[in-house]
Amino acid sequence: MAFESNNPSGDTVKIDIAKEDGGDSSGLRPKALMLSSLAGCSGLDVASLMKKMKLEVDEFTIETVANLTDEHPKYYDNVVIEYHFHGKNLDEKKLQRAVDLSIEKYCGVMEMFRRFAELKIDTIFHSK
C-alpha cells in the first residue's frame, strides 16, 4: 500500500496508510501531507520575508489543525493555521505583515485550500 512520490529534482517522499487500514505506517498519510504542504508553502514565504525585512526571531513554527468531513470522500472542511513566533525583540507589526502577505498574496497552496475549506488564521507571539 506504500507509494513513493518524486519531483523533477529527484527528491522523494513515501506515502502510506495506517496498519489498521492495510498499510504498514511507513510513510506520510496523503491528507496529512496536504497540511504539511500548506504549512511548508506559507512557512517558506514568511521565512523569506523575515529575512528580507531583517527580523529577529529565535524560533518560528506553524501548526495546522483540520477537521475531516464524516462522509466519503472525506476532506478538510475547516483548517486552523497558527503561526508561532518566539523571541526577545519581536517586531509584531512586521511579522504580521509577513504572514498577511503569505496568506493573501504568495502562498498558492493556501489559495487551493480556500477552494474547499474554511480557513482560520492565528498569529501568536511568544516574547521572552
Image (cartoon, helix red, strand yellow):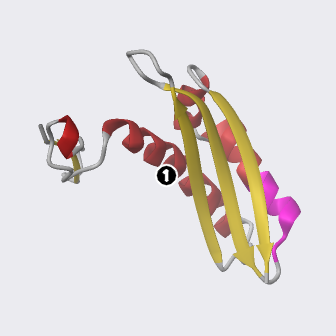
Farthest residue to the right: give it: 93
Residue 68 falls left or right of residue 106: left
Q: Which residues are magenta?
A: 90-98
Give the quadrant of the N terminus.
Answer: top left
Residue 22 image position (x, y, % from top left): 14, 37
Which quadrant would residue 123 be assigned to in this image?
Answer: bottom right
Residue drawn at point x = 51 percent, y = 43 percent:
38
Residue drawn at point x = 59 percent, y = 64 percent:
61
The one nearer the camera, 9 or 103, is 103
SS assignment at label 1: helix
Magenta includes 64? no
Read off the residue under disc 1.
40
State whether residue 105 appears in this view. yes
Q: Is residue 90 above or below residue 27?
A: below
Q: Is residue 67 above or below residue 98?
A: above
Which quadrant would residue 120 be assigned to in this image?
Answer: top right
State whether residue 16 appears in this view. no
Magenta includes 93? yes
